[in-house]
Amino acid sequence: MATTTVYAYERIYEVLVDGAGTNRALIAANRFVRGYPPGFSPDMRATRAKAKPAVFVVIGAAAVEPFASGEISDAHDYRITVAIYRDHWLGYEGDYAEVEAQLVSATNAFFRVRAALCWPGNLALTAESKVTGIAGQALNGAGATTKISRVDSIGTTGRLLQFVDTFSGEFEFSPDA
């Protein structure tokens, strides 16, 4: 049981950036660099995503489970929503083969991200053995979604695509630790 979400964030980045995980870990070619927050300068995001796609993680919603323990319990269970913002460099829109290859790569990235984050055990502990608080030690794969959230023009020859992958999960929090 966790006393903060910081280790959940840390472990998700370890899986996506470092390739951590017991099964379905991302190989080096499919990993990401740590990205900038949504709404950050497209030029800065593009600079980071040109060499390798970038990710930014947000645990953006939490709700008390319908059958949650009372307030006097040592354990508080929450339903969480995790958004993974992925920036992919699209390049020159007039090069159709490049654009298509990048779109295929970005879509396949969602499939790999889902496989890595939703495998039981991959999100149990950080590399330094800190408990993440993510129940089931994985996010829920059922109902996970991805969509293109924005396309930014970069100069006169480039485009940056931002995808948002959304997952649900359970978070076990201890208010007393």
Image (cartoon, helix red, strand yellow):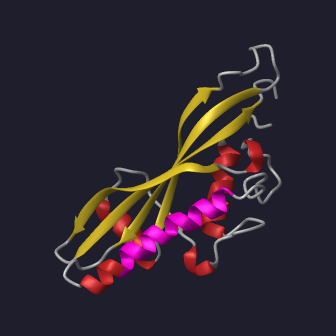
Looking at the figure, which quarter contains the N terminus?
top right
Where residue 98 appears, x then y in whole percent? 31, 84
Please indicate, yes or no, whether residue 4 appears anywhere in the rendered image: no
Q: Residue at x 70, y 47 (%)?
A: 7
Report whether 72 appears left or right of 60.
right
Residue 104 falls within the magenta-colored stretch: yes
Q: Residue furthest left?
A: 156
169 is higher (above) or lower (below) than 147: above
Report whether 141 appears left or right of 177.
left
Please indicate, yes or no, whether residue 95 appears anywhere in the rendered image: yes
Foreground: 66 or 148? Answer: 66
Number of disc labels? 0
Q: Quadrant of residue 69?
A: top right
Where residue 132 appears, x then y in whole percent? 74, 46
Q: Quadrant of residue 79?
A: top right
Foreground: 145 or 98? Answer: 145
Looking at the figure, which quarter contains the C terminus?
top right
Q: Residue furthest front?
A: 142
149 is higher (above) or lower (below) than 96: above
Report whether 57 appears left or right of 140.
left
141 is higher (above) or lower (below) than 68: below
Q: How would you classify the magenta stretch by its main secondary structure?
A: helix
Q: Residue at x 58, y 27 (%)?
A: 63
Where residue 123 appears, x then y in whole percent? 73, 54
Where residue 121 appears, x then y in whole percent? 78, 56
Task: Provide the residue span drawn in magenta.
Answer: 101-118
Report whether 162 appears left or right of 62.
left
